[in-house]
Amino acid sequence: MKCKLTLLFLFVLLSSNIHAQRIVIIGLDGLSSEGFRGSKHPNIDTLFEKGLITLSSRPVLPSVTLPNWTSHLTGQGPEEHGITANNWTLANHPLQAIETDSDGYTPSIFKLLKDKKPQIKTAFYYNWAELINPINKKYLNEVSFEENDKYQSNYAKALKFIGENRNNPTLVFLYSVHVDHAGHSYGWMSPQYISAIEDVDVAIGNLIKKLKAQDLYDDTHFILLSDHGGINKGHGGVTMNEMQVPFAITGKAIRNLGYTTSFFNSNRNTSWIIAKIFGIKKLPKSWTGIAPLEIFK
C-alpha cells in the first residue's frame, strides 16, 4: 500500500511539471508569397527555423478574405461551408452549408475542440469586423475586436490570455488585416505594403520574447497563415500573385524541414492539422481537407 501511495505521489508531482499543450495561430491577411520573399522578417524566420515554411500553399476560390479564413477554421472549402463572399451573414446567404450546428453555423475547429476537450480554452482576436461572422462565438472563451487596423492591444490581450490559461490546453487565433489594407490602399509590393509586413514581424518578435520570459514558449505550436495574395490593388482572381501564400508551422510534433515544397497544402487543411496536434481523430463529416503527413514527426 505504501509503495502504491509513493508511486501515486511521484506521478502527481511529475504531472504538475508538464505544461499544457497550446497552439497560437498568427494570421496575416493579404500576405502573399511574393510579399514574403520581398520583405525582411527576421523574427518570423527565427520562430520557424526548427519547423517549416512553404511558399506554395494555395487559397481556396474565390481568393478573397472571408471564404479563405472560414476554410482555415472549418476544414472545408466554400462549396461545403457556403461562404463565397465577404458579405456573408448567418441571416442572409445564398449557399447553404453542408453541415451546421444547432445555431446554424458550419462546425469550426473551436466547436470541435470544445466538444472533444471541454477543458480547452479558445480565443479569437481580430481587427476586420466581418471576420467573426461565420464563427459561433459560444465556443470561444475570449473575443476581442480592435478598430482602425490596430493590432498591438490584441497581441497584449493574447499574451495575457495564454498566461492566465497556462495549465489548460489552449487555441489562440491572433489575426490582423493591416497588411491586406496596405495592399488595397497602395498596391501589393508597394513600399507601404512591405513596411506593413516588416512592422508586424517586430510585434511577433516581441510576443515570442515575452512568451519565452513567462515559460510559455516551449510547449507551444505556432502556425503562420494567410488567406490570399494580391495584384496591383486588388485580389479575387486566379493569378499566381493571388493564389500563393506562405504557410509556416513549428512545435514538438512538427518535422524540421526548413523552406520546403515537399507537400501540397491548402487553406482547408489548417483545422485538420490543429486537430491532429491535439490528438483528435474523429472530425466533422463536412470537413474535406487533409493533415499532410509529411510535416509531422
Image (spheres, rainbow, N blue to C red):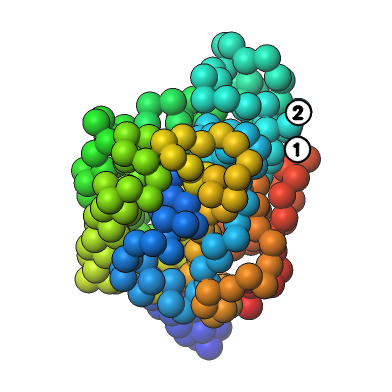
Q: Quadrant of residue 217?
A: bottom left
Tell me whether the residue at label 2 lies in contact with that at label 1, contact meaning CB atoms closer than 8 angstroms.
yes
Residue type at mark 1 is Ser
Q: Quadrant of residue 62?
A: top right
Q: Quadrant of the N terminus?
A: bottom right
The residue that mark 2 highlights is: 98
- Camera-side residue of 237 and 201: 237
User: Is 142 located above or below residue 13 in the figure?
Assistant: above
Tell me where residue 102 appears, x and y as whole percent.
65, 22
Q: Which callout, 2 or 1, points at the residue further toward the start of the chain?
A: 2
Question: Would you call the spot at circle 1 few (<14 residues within 10 Å), some (14-19), or many (20 or more)?
Answer: some
Element on which disc 1 rests: loop
Viewer-closest of 210 and 232: 232
Residue 68's label in the rendered image is none
Give left or right: position of 88 versus 149.
right
Task: Name the residue beneath numbered marker 1.
Answer: 286
Which residue corresponds to the image point at 24% horizontal and 39% vertical from the top-left?
150
Categorize mark 2 by other alpha carbons within 10 Å: few (<14), some (14-19), many (20+).
some
Seen from this angle, which residue lies furthest front?
Answer: 232
Residue 56 position in % (x across, y down): 60, 60
Hey, what amino acid is under mark 2?
Answer: Ile
At 57% across and 11% down in the image, what residue appears?
Answer: 91
- The reply to whether residue 170 is visible in this rendering is no
